[in-house]
């Protein structure tokens, strides 16, 4: 049973990495409580459609195939284009007027494919930012990734960044020496200077995290230290109380080979994953307190939640 009362959020949500959907390929994805068919046409254009054909309901992602920039249904071979319009019925000269299926606005950016989900089908009101360093020769050539699925809601995961006291209790960090959050339209920034008196190697470590969140599905975090990295945290609801959480990272090469830095990032990701996993038992077992009792040194929980309200069509507490 869901332990929260939060509805499906509106916004951009990642459904695949670009490299996972080649030209002519179709892939079934469960996201936003729906079964979707994600495909790449022969021109390279990506379409995301409701997986179930508007004719008699076959699943386009199971046995369907791509022809030109459309998907051919495995059941009666009707073809649907990236905008969800029926473009061919092989056994009929007339296509019924209004033969359309649900399609999602798609943004392919930074080697990742995002869909726009809106409960009332309203048009996108913000964008996923383009990361200039992605594809730059001074940076690793592709994402090193790590992914999980867990029982939670994106708002709960994002709240973690400004929930300062849990850094000490759950992650065994020192009290953050500097912390800041700015809620600004569709995004919020947060900066944390923190550290470990003793990290997993028994050493002291200082770190600065600078995060930018765009909506409830996308977070960009920059680490500036010995190794410069940029990571994307993509959180996509699968169903109302289950989500996909994908972390992906690129790093600056500083004259080293791509393979070497990718290897280092993989090792780093393994370590970071241990930190993320510390949150899992909390996330998966907590409930969403609509009216929490807070103290003076808690993070800006209520401010964050007021910011998050703009991503729902329904009223939330
Ligand atoms: S169910 Fe798709 S063409 Fe008939
Ligand atoms: Fe955490």
Image (spheres, rainbow, N blue to C red):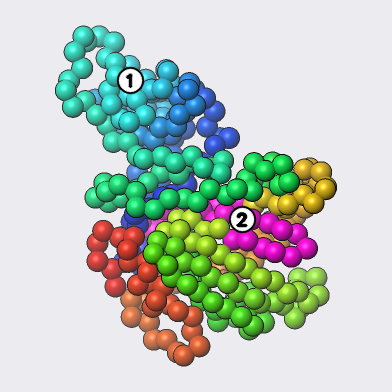
Q: Find disc 2 in the rendering and name its residue.
A: 231
* Residue found 36% across the figure and 40% down from its top: 105
Q: Which residue is mark 1?
A: 79
Q: Is residue 33 visible?
A: no
| SS for dot 1 | strand
Please give the name of the residue rendered at 72% of the width and 58% of the height, measured from the top-left corner: 228
Picture coordinates of residue 307, whole percent (x, y): 37, 69
Q: In which quarter of the view is residue 242 placed?
A: bottom left
The quarter of the image holding the N terminus is bottom left
| Residue 271 located left or right of residue 163 | right
Residue 243 pos. (x, y %): 45, 54
Q: Which callout, 2 or 1, points at the residue further toward the start of the chain?
A: 1
Closest to the observer, 214 or 291:
214
Characterize the local packing of mark 2: few (<14), some (14-19) or many (20 or more) Cα atoms within 10 angstroms: some
- Would residue 57 be found to the left or right of residue 229 on screen? left
Check residue 242 for magenta coloring. yes
Mark 2 in CB contact with mark 1 (< 8 angstroms): no
Mark 1 nearby-residue class (10 Å; few <14, some 14–19, many ≥20) = many
The label shown at residue 24 is: none
- Which segment is the magenta one? 221-248
Magenta stretch holds residue 64: no
In x, y percent, where is residue 129? 50, 51
Secondary element type, mark 2:
strand
Residue 289 x/y as whole percent: 37, 76
The answer to whether 297 is drawn above or below residue 94 in the figure is below
Secondary structure character of the magenta stretch overall: strand
């Amino acid at each position: 049973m869901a332990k929260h009362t939060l509805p499906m959020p509106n916004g951009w949500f990642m459904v695949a990495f670009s490299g996972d959907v080649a030209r002519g390929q179709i892939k079934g994805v469960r996201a936003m409580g729906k079964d979707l068919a994600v495909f790449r046409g022969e021109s390279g254009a990506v379409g995301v459609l409701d997986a179930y054909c508007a004719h008699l309901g076959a699943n386009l992602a199971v046995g369907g195939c791509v022809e030109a920039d459309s998907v051919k249904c495995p059941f009666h071979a009707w073809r649907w284009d990236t905008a969800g319009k029926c473009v061919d019925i092989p056994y009929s000269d007339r296509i019924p007027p209004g033969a359309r299926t649900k399609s999602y606005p798609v943004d392919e950016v930074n080697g990742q494919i995002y869909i726009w989900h809106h409960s009332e089908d309203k048009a996108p009101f913000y964008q996923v930012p383009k990361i200039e360093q992605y594809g730059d020769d001074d940076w690793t050539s592709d994402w090193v990734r790590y992914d999980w699925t867990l029982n939670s809601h994106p708002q709960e995961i994002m709240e973690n960044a400004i929930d300062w006291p849990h850094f000490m209790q759950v992650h065994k960090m020192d009290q953050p020496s500097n912390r800041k959050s700015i809620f600004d339209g569709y995004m919020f920034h947060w900066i944390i200077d923190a550290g470990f008196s003793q990290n997993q190697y028994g050493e002291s470590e200082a770190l600065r995290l600078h995060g930018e969140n765009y909506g409830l599905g996308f977070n960009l975090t920059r680490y500036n230290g010995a190794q410069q990295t940029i990571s994307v945290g993509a959180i996509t609801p699968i169903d109302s109380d289950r989500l996909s959480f994908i972390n992906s990272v690129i790093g600056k090469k500083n004259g080293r080979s791509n393979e070497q830095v990718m290897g280092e990032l993989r090792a780093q990701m393994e370590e970071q994953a241990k930190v993320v996993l510390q949150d899992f038992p909390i996330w998966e077992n907590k409930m969403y307190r609509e009216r929490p009792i807070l103290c003076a040194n808690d993070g800006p929980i209520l401010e964050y939640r007021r910011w998050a309200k703009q991503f729902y069509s329904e009223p939330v507490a």
